[in-house]
Image: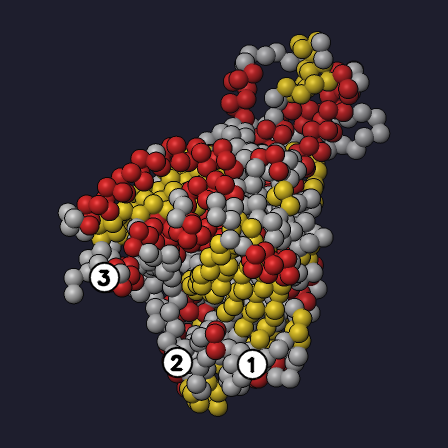
Amino acid sequence: MTTETQSTEERTQKLEGLGTRRKRVEDVRFTQGKGNYIDDFKLSGMLFGAFVRSPYGHARVKSINKEGALALPGVRAVLTAEDLKPLKLHWMPTLAGDVQAVLADEKVLFQGQEVAFVVAEDRYVAADAVDLVEVEYEDLPALVDPNQSMAAAALVLRDDLQGKTSGAHGPRKHHNHIFTWEVGDAEGTARAISDAQVVATERIVYQRVHPCPLETCGCVASMDKVNGHLTVWGTFQAPHAVRTVASLISGIPEHKIRIVSPDIGGGFGNKVGVYPGYICSIVGSIVLGVPVKWVEDRMENLQATAFARDYHMSGEIAATQDGRVTALRVHVLADHGAFDACADPTKYPAGFFSICTGSYDIPVAHVTVEGVYTNKAPGGVAYRCSFRVTEASYFIERMIDVLARKLDMDPAEVRRRNLIRKEQFPYTSALGWEYDSGDYLTALDKALNTVGYASLRDEQRRNREAFARGETRKLMGIGVSFFTEIVGAGPIKNCDILGLGMFDSCEIRVHPTGSVIARLGTISQGQGHATTFAQILASELGIPAENITVEEGDTDTAPYGLGTYGSRSTPVAGAATAMAGRKIRAKAQMIAAHLLEVHDDDLEWDVDRFRVKGVPELSKTMTELAFAAYNNVPPGMEPGLEAVSYYDPPNMTYPFGAYVCVVDVDVDSGVTEIRRFYALDDCGTRINPMIIEGQVHGGLTEALAIAMGQEMAYDASGNLTNASLLDFFLPTAVETPSWETDFTTTPSPHHPIGAKGVGESPNVGGVSAFSNAVIDAFAHLGLTHTQMPHDHWRVWKTAEGLGLTPA
Ligand code: CDP
């Protein structure tokens, strides 16, 4: 019999399970400078690699002279495409079914492209040697405008694809065309648009931006030639997928490859893909027989690693006079840069862009997306976003505002009239997605009431009158956005990456003393998985979270998983964690029945123990059962208390939120002050409210960056004109306003604990709220849209264009 000294409440609190604002266990090492990042790795005999990169956006490589570099003391090797050719590693497959030059093969196609890889005894010598490699280029004209990519006379960018009339995603109709992807009812949409009472059209560009994780990309490759084992420590968001790809590319058997992602300083999609640095470090280690480290610098990261967005969207939205949307049509021109290296599930070359009907009950819709090549860096990753969802959300949230202007209706009211109603869930959208759950009106009403929307609009009316009278030079703008996310890829039947189904996993071992180690197929890059996944298990197992260690990122120990990006960890690996926990509990229940000499069904679960129904004083705690698992199990049962779950989600989860942004725009300087930003998120069951708030704060800060300043700007020759953080906007505490967060809770009906993802939501919903607010400041003057980013200069130009600035 177990004696009880604590109340149910005290026992529950002790667990620090679901819903607890548990402090992040990771922060103990991070705040003491004890994190273990790639650049902290020091292995015996380790060498350092650095790239010679193209200064040109488009050029023919006529010759490469390594002699000067090789003569520098400390330089051990200089690799070029010619050196990689015998190994067939001069080109590598991309995640999107294209190929990418590892080192420039006859041509360079974007500024910053990798041309040669220098390996030296230290990083400084490597950097000096980079300057001594002489590359002779023949400069070629560059193609930077995607609108020109498919002109009849457009330059041929990809010599290697000449004559190829089909690619990974179907027919190619031009030498710079990658794919055309189409979904929806073309005829029905055309009919609805031509019959509509009102049609609003707009061309909306979501500019090219860059994820900018604090830690850049890097790796240490170490080939043990004696045993034939390759170990690579790297900034990988999907270590298992990297292991499989590394095996397929190199021919090294997969069981002889170990990929480890140690602490990672932010990913945001930037660390999903495979970069030439990884391949060259591995080759360097194989050739030289010692470990080779490569860590890119900040400018290299900005110039050459995966960009995001660059979607050029032409939209039409049809509606009735009273604001009911009847159809949506959009054509997207997607600039993928020099190689198609987008990170999307195989079947979706435009990601989940077809979630672009958003939170609205739109009867019919049609989407076409055309991907094209330009002389820019490859990428197209989900920058804090689930595969082009941010583009989709920005598009629909701007289109609703554009429509509201045309109808002369309040933008929040247009939203209210079209939101999918609670009773319509599960809701199948016109473009085929099945939204799992939602209660949109409750969320919108809560948001509008909390910010005092009606009085904000009154204040705005008074502000405009005062502006007209010349009493102020500031205009007030109010931006509303209501977004729906789609996160948690799989299911396997729909989603794979390079043929690997997008499930995820958790393996649990309960030790005899009742402490636990759980290993997952995901990898935290700052999201706090070690904290939150222990909380899921604490609630499932009745074992305090502090007694549960969560480990990720080592392919030798973690079960196979598809990694962390697109807010998939909680919907997929979080579900696997709960399911594996339930397997443990089921076994523990049988052991309890054996010890208490009752039938399994006579037991009930009570926070951290099983009790005999009707005889509550007869119970066994999980700690007792853990020990019994190693010495007194029922006859025929295997000893031990371990379980693994590979979870293929039946559907994705659909978090949502209502955001309101209030700005004051100074028309003389173009400076926009964010007066207030309110973010209501619904991510289903909340595991750790404090971590969720942190995720929302971080995501909103990135949304602020994108909406108000970030743009990768190329000149006509293909030069990236803002290739350093002096020119590329990365907000600091100075620019970042304080955020108000709020929530509603609509659990996912198919997730074991009802949780949906949240990490991407603030970026998905935030960008349009900022943009809508800035444009709203000028709406009474007839402005319906201006392109992001809304930096001071562009906002000032808008004011000037509207005749607001002194002549
Ligand atoms: O895949 P990623 O970790 O980037 O995104 P996520 O699944 O949205 O989780 C981000 C962080 O928020 C994790 O620590 C989650 O466990 C936590 N979270 C939570 O506490 N409750 C939720 N309903 C969703 C996420």
Q: CA distance from mark 1 to mark 3?
A: 46 Å
Q: Image point 52% across, 67% down: which residue?
A: 334
Residue at 52 percent across and 18 percent down: it is 10
Mark 2: few, some, or many residues within 10 Å (few <14, many ≥20)? some
Q: Are marks 3 and 2 in contact (CB under 8 Å)?
A: no
* Label 1 packing within 10 angstroms: few (<14), some (14-19), many (20+): some
Mark 2 sits on what residue?
A: 717
- Of the two numbered discs 2 and 1 on the same chain, state the one appearing first in sequence: 1
Q: Which residue is mark 1?
A: 158
Question: SS class of the residue under badge 3?
Answer: loop
Q: Secondary structure at mark 2?
A: loop
Which three-letter amino acid code belongs to the residue tagged 1?
Answer: Arg
Q: CA separation, marks 3 and 2? A: 34 Å
Q: How is the image coloured?
A: secondary structure
Q: Earlier in the sequence, mark 3 or mark 2?
A: 2
Q: Residue at x 51, y 51 (%)?
A: 319
Which residue is under mark 3? 803
